[in-house]
Amino acid sequence: GINIIRSYNNLIRNNIIMGNWVYGLYIRSHSNNNTICNNLIIDSSSDGIYIQNSDGNVISNNVISDGYGGVSLRASSYNSIINNIILNNNGGIAIAFDSCNNTSLAQERYELLREIFLQDSEDMFDNCTR
């Protein structure tokens, strides 16, 4: 997959990321203000997109399927998860551990065991459909 560490203002766009041992896309260690859009992320043994200790990222118009989970945020705030298709995973969106002020809008077609999981978070979800 793709691993971003202590890097900011990157554009990750129009990739096919598949058959990943762990995460399809791993953003961590204060990697802020990145845009992840129009990617196809398939068959990750963990989450398709995992963001840890990173703020202000935009995740939009991605397809995340056939993996363990869709999108996970850990200790990350002010991220936007917009108009993604997340399907055939065990989980959809997980936001936990002091992640605050994240926004999730217009997610589509969940076919999951667990759709949205929040723990120790203050976030907004709007127009998420199943």
Image (tube, rainbow, N blue to C red):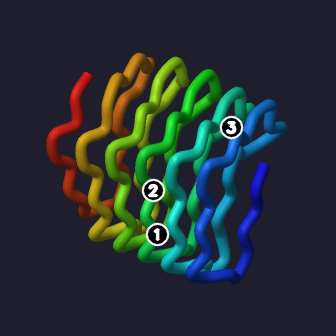
Please provide percent x and percent y for residue 22: 77, 42
As drawn, the label of residue 26 is none
Choose mark 1 or mark 3, whichever is in front. 1
From what the image shows, is residue 14 above or below residue 45?
below
Q: Which residue is mark 1?
A: 57
Q: Residue at x 52, y 47 (%)?
A: 38
Please provide percent x and percent y for residue 56: 42, 75
Mark 3 neighbour density, 10 Å: few (under 14) some (14–19) many (20 or more) = many
Name the residue type under label 1. Answer: Asn
Name the residue type under label 2. Answer: Ile
Please provide percent x and percent y for residue 48: 61, 41
Q: Which residue is mark 2?
A: 59
* Mark earlier in primary sequence (3, 2): 3
* Mark earlier in primary sequence (1, 3): 3
Q: Residue at x 59, y 68 (%)?
A: 11
Badges 1 and 2: C-beta atoms under 8 Å apart? yes
Mark 2 neighbour density, 10 Å: few (under 14) some (14–19) many (20 or more) = many
Label 3: element kind: loop
Q: Residue at x 57, y 61 (%)?
A: 51
**Is 13 situated left or right of 124 in this image?**
right
Label 1: element kind: loop
Q: Nearer the viewer, residue 87 or 36?
A: 36
Q: Residue at x 71, y 34 (%)?
A: 44
Choose mark 3 or mark 2, whichever is in front. 2
Q: Which residue is mark 3?
A: 46
Report the Cα–Cα distance between label 1 and label 2. 7 Å
Name the residue type under label 3. Answer: Ser
Q: Nearer the viewer, residue 28 or 63?
A: 63
